[in-house]
Amino acid sequence: MRINLWKSCGVNIKILVGLDAADRDASELIVKTAIEQGPVDGIFNLAVSLKDVEEGFPGLAIQWGAIGDVGLVAEMQNEDKEFVIGGTLLQRISSCLQELNGFLVQDKAVVASMVVAAKRGDSDVNNIVDAVLKILCIKDLNSINQHTSLPELGMDSMTAIEIKQTLEREYDVYLTASDIRNLNFAKLIEMNNKSTDNSNLNENDTNQILSITNMLRQLFGEVSSTELAIPLKTNPAEDRGEIFFLPGIEGYADVFKTLESNIKSPATCFQFALIYELKTVEAMANSFLPLILDKLKDRSDFLLVGYSFGSVLAIELTRMLEAKGFIGRLILIDGAPQHLKIFIQQNLRSSSQEELDNNILLDIMNAYVGLNVVELELELTKCNSWDEKLNAFFNVLSPEHKELFLKGDRRKAIHSLHVRLQAVMAYNPEPMPYLRTPITLFKPQLPSVLNAAYDYGLKNITEAKVDVHTVEGNHTTILGAKEILMAINGEPFENAATIKKT
């Protein structure tokens, strides 16, 4: 589409394919071919610029916003002084030259300059499709082939970031950088239809799908107590046994604050916080086992409550307690091994461990920084280990962002997230002996992952019954459901679907 437009303006276009611009021989061929067309005053290739800098040669890649004074966009402006394209106002050539002076005397390989337009309500943008059309300055959806990829329709690295952030901020749609590059309007229409169907369940609830960003917000919150075992502030009745709680991937007991004051038993929550030395689910569960056994000295029964990632630990702890002759109950809140694996696959689509590692860091960069994503993506391809990748992540941060991340111990938080996601993917309880403990599963009306099994696959790990309850809320607000509190307190309630092993 853009090529035909350029040709109509008399531009001579020559396309070379199958060449790696970062390879010296290929680069020489590209430059030689270009010289045959005419004088070469500059090379506009991010990979070449970064390669030059890496080898000690001068190199600078500048990402400009929309440019005024000259070109097609300037001709489209007419008398509209507030012409907005790609979320930016037109930047005058004099301003670009002034910024260029500063760019030439600094040491960064990738920089950007743009005039950001003021954000204002837009009555013309009502859904995902309209939002992307607006960003790409496409007036009529019928004027394009809906199966043409967004890059072919003019999406560059700047508009890709704007699309990603808009989908996350306005529509709670979380996609990786590679997902954005593979998008077309046919896929966007399908996503919009699914989003509309989900919003009909609860129009006031916009936080529908659990995402890596949601997990990171929990991990990057204020640091709470780092003690391994925290007593919850419950209101215990006489002669009631202690209950053991396991939190989500953030690892802090604070997640149960909405529940604790109404629990009628003494309760302990086990925290894993920023502890990343334990690499497997089994090792994590084994670290809590002695503490549980100490509190069960005069008892033969137990009650474990696991939320999200904590559900996987609760299952493994149940297996360990059963092996020592204990009997009990297991309450899982929107979590199970199969369920979390599907979540990881849906959010961090990857075909290898290397790609999984990369996507974790790219998602964090997109969610919390929004810049240097292209530079980070290139740097990650040069790394051979997770530690090298983590170092590369911090190396591309600006001094301000680096100080912010290091100040809050974000490095340990990222490392902890990586370890726990890996532990979930490696954990497989199905070949092990079936549990004998009955399981009560609570899942939200607004699903935390798409197309999950009704019982989250729990019937494959227990020979006892699995009671499944769907309650109001999403992955976060489910903890406020009264049915969960009643189950913890051993009080009867209705609307359970029971699945038995056959």
Image: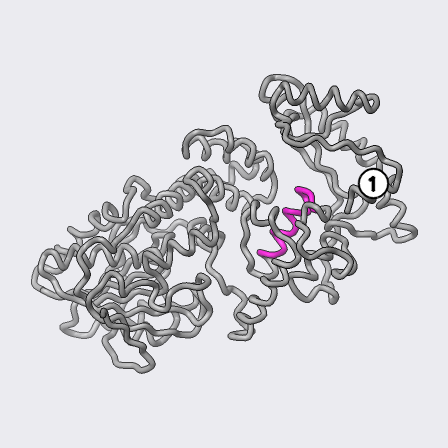
* Residue shown at the point (15%, 57%) measured from the top left: 321
Mark 1: few/some/many CA within 10 Å (<14, 14-19, 20+): few
Residue 23 falls in which quadrant of the image?
top right
Provide the secondary structure element on which disc 1 rests. Answer: helix
Where's residue 428, x and y in %?
A: 28, 51
Q: Which residue is mark 1?
A: 6
| Magenta highlight: main SS | helix
Give left or right: position of 335 versus 450: left
Task: Indicate whether residue 164 is drawn in magenta.
Answer: yes
Residue 476 image position (x, y, % from top left):
43, 64
Magenta stretch: residue 399 in it? no
On screen, residue 27 above or below 323: above
Residue with the most extreme right position: 79
Whole-percent x, y for residue 450 in the image: 46, 62
Give the left or right position of residue 482, taking residue 490 as reference. Answer: right
Q: From the image, which quarter does the C terminus lie in? A: bottom left
289 lies above or below 483: above
Q: What amino acid is labelled 1 in the image?
A: Trp
Is 311 on the left or on the right of 476, as rendered?
Answer: left
Which residue is depicted at the point 60% across and 63% down? 190
Question: Magenta residues?
Answer: 155-168
| Residue 430 in picture, x, y percent from top left | 25, 56
